[in-house]
Amino acid sequence: MVGIGDVAPDFSLPDQDGHVVSLSSFRGRPVVLYFYPRAMTPGCTREAQGFQAREPDLSAHRVAVLGISVDSTDRQKEFSDRCHLAFPLLSDTQRSVAKTYGVLGIFGMAKRVTFLLDPEGKVVDVVVGMRPGPHIEAAMRRFASPPA
């Protein structure tokens, strides 16, 4: 699995609208790169809605949020529309990005793993686990908390 201190491998994937999105296009900004198992399932819906609820604060700190699953662009579009998401959901149907990041599960779905990237694309934190809350909380602590 890609770990803390590694430079996040670049990729290009289609988003829910069919536009190709490259990770490298976000250089210069912190990034929350979260992998999730399946669009429109209860845990993934809570996670997407949780990131969306905090998107204005993250955006105010110039943080980009990118969600990735192995779902099709059509399914991602339906999920994005249902959750009213303001950030891209990327479709990794070939599972190549999930494999590269070491998050492909045994059933061919991505595991719930969040990579927090600094503006240079270096991984500064990795959150692993099925509960969505810790992923959102880690992103907020790292990128949107007021300076001490």
Image: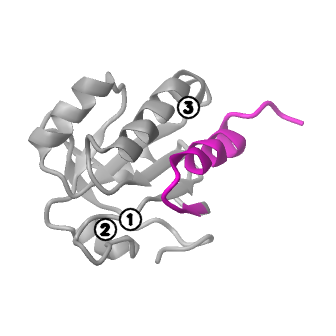
Relative vertical location of residue 7 with respect to residue 137 in this rendering, above or below: below
- Disc nearest the viewer among 3 and 2: 2
- Rounded to the nearest angstrom, the CA distance separating label 3 from label 2 is 25 Å
Q: Are marks 1 and 3 in contact (CB under 8 Å)?
A: no
Mark 1 vs 3, N-terminal side = 3
- Which of 37/27 is in front? 37
Q: Residue at x 30, y 44 (%)?
A: 41
Q: Is residue 121 above or below residue 7?
A: above
Which x, y percent locates residue 75? 14, 41
Give whichever of discs 3 and 2 has the lower sequence position: 3
Q: Are marks 3 and 2 in contact (CB under 8 Å)?
A: no
Task: Say above or below: 70 vs 5.
Answer: above
**Helix, strand or loop status at disc 1:** loop
Magenta region, residue range? 126-148
Query: Quick check: can you spot residue 96?
Result: yes
Residue corresponding to mark 3: 62
Location of the C terminus (image quadrant): top right
- Viewer-side label of 2, 1: 1
Q: Is residue 91 left or right of residue 8?
A: left
